[in-house]
Amino acid sequence: MSVFEAADFDNHDEVVFVNDETVGLKAIIAVHNINRGPGLGGMRMRPYKNSKEALQDVLRLSKGMTYKAAMMDVKLGGAKSVVIGDPRKDKTPELLAAMAEAIDHLGGRYIAGEDIGTNPLDMKELKKGTQYVSCLREEDGGLGDPAPITALGTMHAIKAGLNHCNNSVDLNGVHVAVQGVGNVGEDVCRQLSEAGAKITISDVYPDVVERVAKQYNADVVAPEEIYDVDADVFSPCAIGAIVNDDTISRLKVKIIAGSANNQLATEAHGQQLAEKGIVYLPDYVANGGGNIVCAAEWYKEGFGGVLAQVAKIYDTCTEILEYAKTNNTATNFAANKIAEERFQN
Ligand code: NAD
């Protein structure tokens, strides 16, 4: 199969396959669209079943980055990279050096950041071989971990949803079900707890879920039961494709707003949510806070304007909700339309 025939190919500018047998590197870098600026996106490392699965992931994720950057109004385009391998076993300095060389060859059309399976220390390692890296620790010249900023943006999206449904952004007594309490999800719980929300959580790691539940006085359900929780808000902060044919009929919430990428299994599931009366805040808007801080780091703007820019996620969500209502369309289609107007011109 050629990349042009792949189901998720979306007229991407450039898709580069990287193969370096001497260090065991098999990677794909996808640059979706760089009309607004260089394509910034995480470098994901996972033991993909095969290259088809890796290609599908990188094509979808890089496209999402274009839409995210446009909605966050940063001077960035969309790109992403995936490395096929187990980060705990296969991530060697040699592999990272080879990946840095491949990134450098793209001459700045792709800027790498952290993602699943990579971290700020890996970015430091990449930096030895290329300048086109972001998401570094403060001690390495960066603006630090983007996760708390992503969580802050997710809170703004939740509040925009609440205002739409309740005419109030007050979280006191509002019940939120959080799926996944890792870097972002735990910070969402912290902020929800401070605002007096009732919290129910799930995670696949029992020790993590126990610690977070205790700290923020949250109820716990098994991972598979999170879709059945009778809450006001569902906040997916773990994996993608969790709004799908199996889960959609089980959801009892009024609002979905979370940090996970690609929450809808397909765009049609966004339409189904709208038909069910569930207000869906599109993932690439609700999780755009990290993109804002990485852009500020890349352009050496410092942290000064970041929080004000992240607060605009509330206004962007409101704009999407109004556009969807006026045009009688689902929020995911509304967001896509607004983003496309911003990056296609
Ligand atoms: P993380 O790996 O720290 O946390 C994810 C958590 O989800 C982990 O604790 C994991 O055990 C849990 N999990 C995995 N599968 C689960 C399941 N089926 N049910 C319940 N829990 C499950 O990752 P993170 O940095 O917190 O990111 C969370 C999501 O947000 C990811 O989809 C990521 O791509 C997205 N995101 C993160 C950022 C960021 O700044 N970190 C930015 C944008 C988007």
Image (cartoon, rainbow, N blue to C red):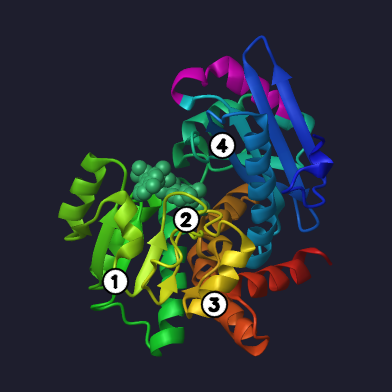
In the depicted view, which residue is nearer to us: 147 or 269? 269
Disc nearer the start of the sequence (4/1):
4
Q: CA distance from mark 4 to mark 2?
A: 19 Å
Q: Which residue is mark 2?
A: 242
Disc 2 residue: CB within 8 Å of ligand 1 = yes
Q: CA distance from mark 4 to mark 3?
A: 31 Å
Q: Find residue 230 and name its label.
A: 1
Q: Which residue is mark 4?
A: 44
Q: What is the magenta range?
A: 88-102
Q: Amino acid at mark 3?
A: Ala
Disc nearer the start of the sequence (4/2):
4
Position of residue 40 measured from the top left corner of the image (x, y, whole percent): 66, 47
Q: Amino acid at mark 1?
A: Asp
Q: Amino acid at mark 2?
A: Ile
Q: CA distance from mark 3 to mark 2?
A: 16 Å
The residue sitting at 60% across, 81% down in the picture is 319
Q: CA distance from mark 4 to mark 1?
A: 34 Å
Disc nearer the start of the sequence (3/1):
1
Check the picture and name the quadrant holding the C terminus.
bottom right
Position of residue 299 measured from the top left corner of the image (x, y, whole percent): 65, 51
| Mark 2 crowd level (few <14, some 14–19, many ≥20, 10 Å Cα) | some
The residue sitting at 24% across, 48% down in the picture is 209
Q: Secondary structure at mark 1?
A: loop
Q: Which residue is mark 3?
A: 274
Disc nearer the start of the sequence (2/1):
1
Q: Secondary structure at mark 2?
A: loop
